Amino acid sequence: MASEKSLEEQLEKLRQKLTEAGVKVLSGNWGGKGGIARYKGQWLVVMDRHLPANLKLRLLQAMYQLLSVPGSQHSTLGTHIERRTEETRGDSDGGAPTSDSS
């Protein structure tokens, strides 16, 4: 029981820190899922309210670590993630990946 309370306290402290940093933390009925996203320039952490506390804590910790990377600002991190998304998707227009024939 003591560890559950401690975990809940950690969750609340981390949630508060992220909220103060401008991150919107959404909790609701999300089909047992959760994740991190950037929408219209704002960071979001989405968590199903039925997720185990340890998974909620891991999501919040991941977001906190992303924002704590030395030398990176929210916009820099957003650019990095957008670039990675383009790499995964293909070119910046969303087309198929191209290969260099050099």
Image: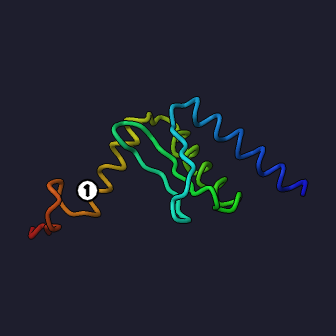
Q: Is residue 8 left or right of residue 39?
A: right
Q: Is residue 97 above or below residue 73?
A: below
The quadrant where residue 74 appears: top left
Direction front: furthest residue: 29
Residue depicted at x 64% and y 61%: 50
Q: Is residue 5 left or right of residue 38?
A: right
Q: Assign a secondary structure to mark 1.
A: helix
Residue depicted at x 75% and y 45%: 10
Q: What residue did someone put label 1 on?
A: 86
Q: Is residue 89 above or below residue 36?
A: below
Q: Is residue 80 left or right of residue 5?
A: left
Give the camera-side residue of 55 and 68: 55
Q: How many marks?
A: 1
Give the camera-side residue of 93 and 51: 51
Direction top: furthest residue: 20
Mark 1 closeness class: few <14, some 14–19, many ≥20 residues within 10 Å:
some
Residue depicted at x 65% and y 35%: 16
Q: Quadrant of the C terminus?
A: bottom left
Colour scheme employed for the rendering of this structure: rainbow
Q: Quadrant of the N terminus?
A: bottom right
> Which three-letter amino acid code belongs to the residue tagged 1?
Glu
